[in-house]
Amino acid sequence: MRFLLVLIPIIFTIYSLVDCAGTDISAIRNLPKWAWILIIILISPIGAIAYWIAGRPRRPGYPRGGSRRIIPPDDDPDFLRNI
């Protein structure tokens, strides 16, 4: 059990570091990519959590705040145009 308590934050930090390094520079929010990488490395589990909350790009198709709605493919003119 103690082994898992040490291993889980390390794995999460490594996963966050790889995710940040593989993300496009223009997609990362709030800080430059190099700053997020330093924060993840220097402040291990807390920096990784901060990256997931404030730095990771939002997934397309899930708008925040309800300003846009998700359009099904058969109603989306851009999708229908590409068929």
Image: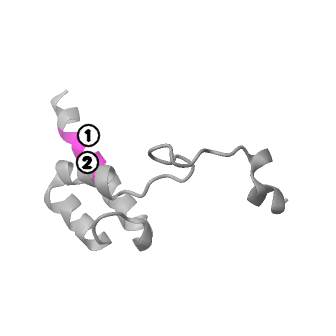
- Left or right: 11, with 66 as reference point: left
For the view shown, which residue lies furthest in the top direction? 1
Q: Which residues are magenta?
A: 6-14
- Left or right: 71, with 83 as reference point: left
Q: What secondary structure is marked by label 1?
A: helix
Residue at position x 14%, y 56% from top? Answer: 43
Taking depth in this image into account, of 81 and 39 the one nearest to the observer is: 81
Q: Is residue 37 above or below residue 10?
A: below
Per the image, the residue denoted by label 2 is 49
Residue at position x 35%, y 63% from top? Answer: 29
Badge 2: few (under 14), some or many (20 or more) residues near its Cα, within 10 Å? some
Residue at position x 26%, y 66% from top? Answer: 37
Q: Quadrant of the N terminus?
A: top left
Taking depth in this image into account, of 31 and 43 the one nearest to the observer is: 31
Spatial separation of the CA atoms under disc 1 and disc 2? 13 Å
Q: Nearer the viewer, mark 1 or mark 2?
A: 2
Residue at position x 19%, y 34% from top? Answer: 5
Q: What secondary structure is marked by label 2?
A: helix
Per the image, the residue denoted by label 1 is 8
Badge 1: few (under 14), some or many (20 or more) residues near its Cα, within 10 Å? few
The percent position of residue 77, horizontal first and vertical second, equals 78, 56
